[in-house]
């Protein structure tokens, strides 16, 4: 239908999860060129896993408890924010191994109207984001070379023109003889969330918080929502620390390890059986892939594109209307619920055609459809407007910003990022077009606004 071949342009600059049923089809052979097969052989040029975060509220609290338990120079009451030394980031990956085998016990009490500062080195700071308002019951912390055991209740309040227990809470945790081991797993006792009905934190919550932050940063808030749904029943051994990063360990059977996939079939869109133009919707397994390559090289971005597009196409989604900017009485893209549809394959021709427009977006330093080569096209440029480039195409196509309506029962359901291609009017219709069989996303790797990533993206479609 010609309607879906109308070009779409992202009108909101700060823009840019999804899955359902599909039947496996056996004995489908991918028709790829030798160049396509060669391009996928080395997909990863970045570290696996995610950074072990030192700035989550839980980690910062644990670091504070560890800090006051392993030195005598600084106490909570002696900290004078902006003037004196504060809490240093000392709860490193090998911190416990450096301690004595003999346990040492410390008693601590925090007063909610007295701010404490926490920086990497403990140096004084006027940065209010480093000022913390902790209040507690009398707490005990026991440390040795196997970890630390904590008892008591610790609450953090927002710093807002000072510290007060009447300010909004950041967290309130009750530690019931909770033992955190050298792998940062709660292996005995418990930490319960006082603000969430005394619900106990997961044993691997410290690692989980880092992984969640990494998924959101790399792939977007909407992909994180999808990831959390798919990992909700994962065990405490789901994640582990390796070489200073949080990596996947025991992967649940409902998830798909990217490393286990046939890369040729992944590019052909047939890795889960369903084929382009088969009339059978893409498999929900596209949305359950983990260990996704994070490099900005072409092979990694091809993989990200296939995962993003085919996850989007595996489930229905509502796409809003787009009117003709030259004639508001005409509709370029009709609003409506787009049904789940067949997967797409990667197309080198579409990629090369899209690159013509990407080159021109970069040359003009702005977003636009400067060259379509007669194909349906999505375009997205973000750095000229003050935002850092995307970490990858998955974020731009699917994950960018939170979903607007992720309720499957809603008539306006669309669980892709509101400002991603799959969530944005016009772009959404292109992503879900049932006539399309191939796609390619071109981009430029740039460094801007303190980050290196991909920008000046163009996605072309062909049937």
Image (cartoon, grey):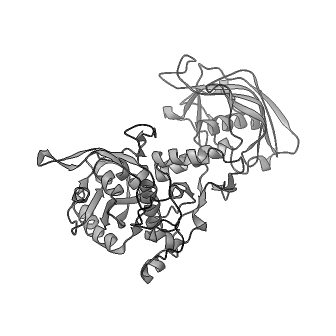
Residue at the extreme right of the image, as rendered? 102
Q: Is residue 63 left or right of residue 21?
A: right
Q: Quadrant of residue 377?
A: bottom left
Residue at the extreme bottom of the image, as rendered? 34
Residue 326 is situated, as x and y percent measured from the top left of the image, at 11, 49
Residue 8 is situated, as x and y percent measured from the top left of the image, at 25, 54
The answer to whether 323 is drawn above or below residue 249 in the figure is above
| Observer able to see residue 14 | no
The answer to whether 31 is drawn above or below residue 358 in the figure is below
The answer to whether 412 is drawn above or below residue 462 in the figure is above
Residue 97 is situated, as x and y percent measured from the top left of the image, at 79, 50
Using the image as rendered, state which of residue 346 and residue 101 is in the foreground.
Answer: 346
Q: Is residue 463 left or right of residue 199?
A: left
Seen at 52% across and 67% down, the residue is 25
The answer to whether 142 is drawn above or below residue 434 in the figure is above
Q: How many marks?
A: 0
Q: Is residue 205 left or right of residue 50?
A: right
- The C terminus is located in which quarter? bottom left
| Observer able to see residue 266 | yes
Seen at 73% across and 44% down, the residue is 185
């Amino acid at each position: 239908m010609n309607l879906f071949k109308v070009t779409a342009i992202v009108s909101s600059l700060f823009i840019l999860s999804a899955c359902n049923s599909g039947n496996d089809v056996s004995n489908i052979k991918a028709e790829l060129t030798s160049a396509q097969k060669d391009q996928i052989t080395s997909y990863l040029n970045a570290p696996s896993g995610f950074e072990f975060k030192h700035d989550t509220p839980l980690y910062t609290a644990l670091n504070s408890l560890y800090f006051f338990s392993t030195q005598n120079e600084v106490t909570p009451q002696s900290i004078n924010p902006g003037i004196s030394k504060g809490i240093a980031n000392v709860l490193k990956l090998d911190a416990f191994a450096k301690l004595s085998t003999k346990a040492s016990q410390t008693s601590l009490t925090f007063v909610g109207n007295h701010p404490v500062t926490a920086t990497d080195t403990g140096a004084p700071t006027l940065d209010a984001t480093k000022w913390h308002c902790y209040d507690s019951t009398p707490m005990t912390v026991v440390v040795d070379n196997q970890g630390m055991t904590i008892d008591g209740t610790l609450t953090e309040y927002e710093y807002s023109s000072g510290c007060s227990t009447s300010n909004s809470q950041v967290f309130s945790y009750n530690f019931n003889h909770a033992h955190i081991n050298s792998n940062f797993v709660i292996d005995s006792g418990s930490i319960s969330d006082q603000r969430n009905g005394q619900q106990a934190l997961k044993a691997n919550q410290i690692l989980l918080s880092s992984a969640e932050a990494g998924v959101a940063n790399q792939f977007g808030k909407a992909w994180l929502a999808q990831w959390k749904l798919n990992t909700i029943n994962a065990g405490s051994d789901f994640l582990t620390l390796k070489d200073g990063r949080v990596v996947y360990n025991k992967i649940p059977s409902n998830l798909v390890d990217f490393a286990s996939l046939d890369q040729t079939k992944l590019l052909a869109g047939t890795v889960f059986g369903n084929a382009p133009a088969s009339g059978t919707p893409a498999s929900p397994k596209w949305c359950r892939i983990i260990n996704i390559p994070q490099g900005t090289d072409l092979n990694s971005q091809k993989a990200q594109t296939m995962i993003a597009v085919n996850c989007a196409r595996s489930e229905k989604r509502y796409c809003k209307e787009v009117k003709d900017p030259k004639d508001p009485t005409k509709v370029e893209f009709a609003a409506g619920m787009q049904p789940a549809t067949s997967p797409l394959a990667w197309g080198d021709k579409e990629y090369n055609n899209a690159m013509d427009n990407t080159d021109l977006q970069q040359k003009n330093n702005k977003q636009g459809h400067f060259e379509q080569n007669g194909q349906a096209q999505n375009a997205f440029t973000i750095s000229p407007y003050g935002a850092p480039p995307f970490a990858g195409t998955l974020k731009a196509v699917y994950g960018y910003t939170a979903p607007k309506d992720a309720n499957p029962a809603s008539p306006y359901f669309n669980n892709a990022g509101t400002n991603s291609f799959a969530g944005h009017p016009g772009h959404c219709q292109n992503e879900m077009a049932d006539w399309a069989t191939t796609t390619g996303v071109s981009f430029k790797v740039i460094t801007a606004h303190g980050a290196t990533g991909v920008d000046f993206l163009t996605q072309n479609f062909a049937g």
